[in-house]
Image (cartoon, rainbow, N blue to C red):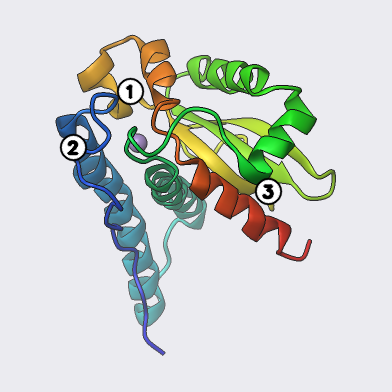
């Protein structure tokens, strides 16, 4: 069987298409430099594993496991992030569909949900993510605050929507004013994608 590696996915929109909320320069660097770094970091580890096994040599498995979690989680979260955004002329605003129903059930209103998710994004210490996830056992939406790319993750919850609040995600456009970036994000949320993820998850056995 063939050995595969991670690849940087293409964006489903152009680098200018999230303006004025995310600039062409910011999005280009974020995708081609930062996301690429996680692809490279993860693949370097895969090569290390392949080589060590081919030569029957040892490596520091504890350090490698930690690095693997960081790089692969970074890779996956960025993929999810690109796809849960889209041009403001088509997306943004309030959701409809199944996700709107769940938000109403669990948060009472979209405004309440937006406030909690924004607070999670603004208060993430250092580098991290605000994440909307879904627990099938309780049929509830949860807001998670992932530190780095991999701390506070709850296994077997699916990710419905993420917001990257690493400084590299917004610093060119918003400098140190993270709350302005978080507020801008609501104009470019692709709720169709969030709905698709929710439907797929509901159709997946527990
Ligand atoms: Mn990022």
Most foreground residue, 91 or 143: 91
Q: Residue 16 carries which label?
A: 2
Please name the residue that numbered disc 3 is placed on. Answer: 157
Q: Earlier in the sequence, mark 1 or mark 2?
A: 2
Q: Which of marks 3 and 2 is in front?
A: 2
Labelled pair 3, 2 in contact (Cβ < 8 Å):
no
Q: Which of marks 1 and 2 is in front?
A: 2
- Image position of 54 with respect to 18: above or below: below
Label 3 and label 1: CA atoms lie apart by 26 Å
Instruction: Return the x and y of residue 181 as percentages of the image width and height.
Output: 36, 19
Q: Residue furthest bottom?
A: 1
Instruction: Return the x and y of residue 149 as percentages of the image width and height.
Output: 47, 39
* Mark 2 neighbour density, 10 Å: few (under 14) some (14–19) many (20 or more): some
Labelled pair 3, 1 in contact (Cβ < 8 Å):
no
Rendered residue at 38%/20% (across/down): 184
User: SS class of the residue under badge 3?
Assistant: loop
Q: Quick one: quadrant of the N terminus?
A: bottom left
Q: In this view, does 39 lie to the left or right of 84?
A: left
Label 1 and label 2: CA atoms lie apart by 20 Å
Please name the residue that numbered disc 1 is placed on. Answer: 167
Most foreground residue, 25 or 85: 85
User: SS class of the residue under badge 2?
Assistant: loop
Q: Quadrant of residue 112?
A: top right
- Note whether ligand 1 is within 8 Å of mark 3: no
């Amino acid at each position: 069987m063939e050995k595969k590696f991670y690849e940087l996915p293409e964006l489903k929109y152009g680098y200018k298409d999230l303006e004025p909320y995310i600039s062409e320069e910011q999005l280009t660097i974020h995708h081609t430099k930062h996301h690429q770094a996680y692809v490279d970091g993860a693949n370097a580890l895969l090569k290390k594993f392949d080589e060590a096994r081919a030569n029957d040599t040892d490596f520091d498995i504890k350090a490698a496991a930690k690095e693997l979690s960081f790089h692969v989680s970074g890779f996956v979260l960025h993929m999810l992030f690109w796809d849960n955004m889209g041009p403001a002329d088509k997306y943004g605003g309030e959701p409809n569909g199944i996700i709107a129903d769940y938000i109403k059930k669990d948060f009472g209103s979209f405004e309440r949900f937006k406030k909690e998710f924004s607070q999670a994004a603004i208060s993430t210490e250092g580098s991290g993510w605000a994440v909307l996830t879904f627990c099938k056992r309780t049929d509830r939406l949860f807001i998670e605050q992932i530190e780095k790319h991999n701390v506070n993750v709850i296994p077997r919850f699916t990710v419905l929507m993420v917001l990257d609040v690493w400084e590299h995600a917004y610093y060119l456009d918003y400098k140190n004013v993270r709350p302005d970036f978080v507020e801008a994000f609501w104009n470019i949320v692709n709720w169709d994608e969030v709905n698709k993820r929710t439907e797929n998850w509901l159709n997946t056995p527990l």
